[in-house]
Amino acid sequence: MFSLIKSFIKKTFIAYYKENDIFYIQKIIVKKNKIIEEYDKTFENEKEFLNFIKMSLMENTQTYISTLIMNYNQGCLDSCSHKRYKEFGIHIENIKILCVNNKFSIFIGIFELQEFKKKIEQYDVDLIYSPYLIIEANKEKTINTLYALITQENIVLSIYKKESPLYSAIYEFKQEETENKTDNNENDSNMFNDEISIDDVEEIDDLDDLDNLEENIEEKDLDKLDDLKNDENNEDFTNIKEETEITNFIKDSIKDYYENYSDDFLENIYLLKTYEFDTKFLKEIGDELLVNVEVKKIDILNDINLLARKDIDV
């Protein structure tokens, strides 16, 4: 009887994330397991966003607000076992661990999570998700497959060896007067003041393809940048700069994966993009490494709301 009554209660789900000082939101209203209202909106200042949240909560007390935590001090492991964390030299008392489908786990430093919660406290957030859950929700093939979730501020990368991600890394695009930040399972130890080592991984001796790729990319990018260096406001300059960062990060991650994690060569690369940009340069990675590259546009706000509905059991 209670579950029947519950199905008639309208629930509101608001997914948001902040990027380049803009709040992107998707609001949906669900009744009887069906979406009866849905719209996307952006807010260019915090006051407008806070007013929107306040009004939504006044309209319906059954409102659930969700967001992503893009902090780069997080990652994945191919197990939920604490023993596996010890193998990587990660102190479990310093991290929050989420086991996903009893197959793999996502972790983040407790301090970073607490700081993020303080930062968003005024937004009345109910659910916080890792971008690795967005990748998991959009995954297709998993055997020796790399996924790169590309937003306007970050690249979130994970490599699936079999059914679960073995390698993970996050890159923050370089901004003026700020340093870029990178992270992967090899240097997660910096967060926990320990050293990660894997003794049972065979080293790959021949990485000529990656070296050639690096040389080809650097030569082309330098030529393009020389042509545009006198006009840094030029859109082409910005695009090439971004292309270079994306390409170098993916290339460096693959090299790190081969040297320290697995000697099974990648078969597929999936690029999950949240906004429109030219992907021809990314196809070149596949051509150089003889790896199939697929590009997929995703709706990250819709994915967040789907995760929230599942957790709230709607």
Image (cartoon, helix red, strand yellow):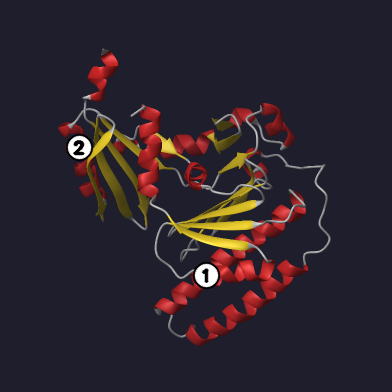
Disc 1: which residue: 243
SS at badge 1? helix
- Residue 244 in sight: no
2 or 1: tag closer to the N-terminus: 2
Q: CA separation, marks 2 and 1?
A: 39 Å
Position of 186 with respect to 169 (left or right) is: right
**Residue 15 screen position, x and y as percent:** 33, 42
Crowding at label 1, few (<14), some or many (≥20) Cα neighbours within 10 Å?
Answer: many
The location of residue 308, given as percent across then percent down, is 37, 35
Q: Amino acid at mark 2?
A: Ser
Q: Residue 23 or 91: which is nearer the viewer?
A: 23
Where, quadrant-wise, is the C terminus in this rendering?
top left
Q: Which residue is mark 2?
A: 56
Give left or right: position of 229 versus 199.
Answer: left
Q: Position of residue 93 (x, y in %)?
A: 61, 27
Is residue 263 depicted above or below 112 in this figure? below
